[in-house]
Image (spheres, rainbow, N blue to C red):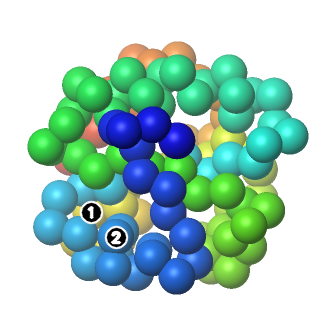
C-alpha cells in the first residue's frame, strides 16, 4: 500500500466502503498474482488523480476471503466501483487505465 491507497479488510469493509460518502474503487488482488502486480501502478495513479473524488483501496483476497466471496470475486485482479453501498461497475483483469477511468467518470 501507499499513502494514496487504503488497505481494506473484512473488518473495515462496511465502514470504509459500503458506508462511504464518495464512490470507492476496490482492487481485489493477491501477492502471488502477476497481473495484479502489473495493474498496481495504474491503481496508484488513479488514487492520486481522483483524490478527494473517489476513495481508492486494495483488498488482499487471501487475507480477506469473506468479502471476496460476498462480492463474487472469482478471478483477480477484479476492480469493483461501489457508490452508495451498491456495485456500479466491475472490471476483471489487468486492463488499460483508460477502461478504469471511463468507468469512474461515468459515475462522477
> In this picture, is 58 found above or below 105?
below
> In this picture, is 92 found above or below 45?
below
Identity of the residue drawn at 48% across and 22% down: 42
User: Closer to the observer: label 2 or label 1?
Assistant: 2
> In this picture, is 91 found above or below 23?
above
User: Where residue 67 sits in the image (x, y, percent)?
Assistant: 61, 75
Residue 67 in the figure: left or right of residue 13: right
Furthest residue toward right: 32
Any part of residue 31 in sight: yes
> In this picture, is 17 found above or below 78?
below
Q: Residues within 10 Å of mark 2 (few under 14, many from 20)?
A: some
Whichever of callouts 2 and 1 sits on the residue coming sooner in the sequence is 2
Task: Work out whether residue 77 or residue 3 is closer to the camera in this orientation and state it.
Answer: 3
User: Where residue 102 sits in the image (x, y, percent)?
Assistant: 32, 28
Q: Which mark is residue 6?
A: none
Q: Quadrant of residue 19?
A: bottom left
Residue 24 in the figure: left or right of residue 66: left
**SS label for mark 1:** strand
Identity of the residue drawn at 14% across and 43% down: 53
Identity of the residue drawn at 40% across and 64% down: 87
The residue that mark 2 highlights is: 16
Q: Quadrant of residue 69?
A: bottom right
The residue that mark 1 highlights is: 83
Amino acid at each position: 500500500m501507499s499513502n494514496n491507497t487504503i488497505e481494506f479488510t473484512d473488518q473495515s469493509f462496511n465502514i470504509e466502503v459500503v458506508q462511504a460518502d464518495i464512490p470507492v474503487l476496490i482492487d481485489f488482488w493477491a501477492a502471488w498474482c502477476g497481473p495484479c502486480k502489473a495493474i498496481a501502478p495504474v491503481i496508484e495513479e488513479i488514487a492520486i488523480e481522483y483524490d478527494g473524488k473517489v476513495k481508492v483501496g486494495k483488498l488482499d483476497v487471501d487475507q480477506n476471503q469473506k468479502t471476496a466471496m460476498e462480492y463474487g470475486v472469482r478471478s483477480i485482479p477484479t476492480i469493483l466501483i461501489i457508490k452508495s453501498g451498491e456495485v456500479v461497475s466491475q472490471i476483471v483483469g489487468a486492463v488499460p487505465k483508460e477502461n478504469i477511468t471511463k468507468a469512474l467518470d461515468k459515475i462522477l
